[in-house]
Image (cartoon, rainbow, N blue to C red):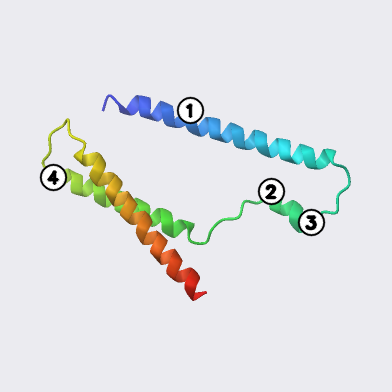
Amino acid sequence: MDHIGPAIILSVMFLGTALVTFVFASFRLRRKILEAGKLEIEPEQIKALYHVSQNKLSPLKWGLVGLFAGMGLIVIQFLPFDANTTLPWGIEITCIAIGFLIYYFVAKNMSSEA
């Protein structure tokens, strides 16, 4: 439990840096568009600058990843292992990878049907 504090701090610092970078890059892009003067831009294109498109299968992906991550934690709970081994990490990463692979095959099948 002593390692959770630094992990949280590192995560917050990374996400904060990513958010600031995204906001700054978006601001610079919009400013350059405005400085370019009058352009032949349709209203739909302007709306696209402010709207981030979302994949319809995104909730499925994160649901599967969360499900398999939870299953990995449940499996780890019932396995006897030494505290200094990396076995729990391997089990958790393998379960998360299985979740991503299942999502990949489901998305592939859905795109081939469409």
The residue where tag 2 is placed is 50
Give the Cα separation between the discs numbered 2 and 3: 11 Å
Q: In what element is the residue under mark 2?
A: helix
Vertical relation: 3 (above or below) 101:
above
Quarter of the figure with residue 98: bottom left
Sort mark 2 into few (<14), some (14-19) or many (20+) by Cα contacts within 10 Å. Answer: few
Give the Cα separation between the discs numbered 4 and 2: 48 Å
**Which residue is painted at 66% across and 36% down in the image?**
25
Sort mark 4 into few (<14), some (14-19) or many (20+) by Cα contacts within 10 Å. Answer: few
Q: In what element is the residue under mark 1?
A: helix
The residue where tag 3 is placed is 43
The residue where tag 1 is placed is 13
**Which residue is painted at 48% across and 72% down in the image?**
112
Amino acid type of the residue tagged 4 in the rendering: Leu
Q: Which percent across, then down, holds residue 72?
A: 25, 49
Which residue is the extreme one toward the right? Answer: 38
Quarter of the figure with residue 34: top right
Disc nearer the start of the sequence (4/3): 3
Disc nearer the start of the sequence (1/4): 1
The residue where tag 4 is placed is 79
Which residue is the extreme one toward the bottom? Answer: 113
**Which residue is painted at 25% across and 40% down in the image?**
89
Does the CB distance between marks 1 and 2 fall below 8 Å?
Answer: no
Disc nearer the start of the sequence (2/3): 3
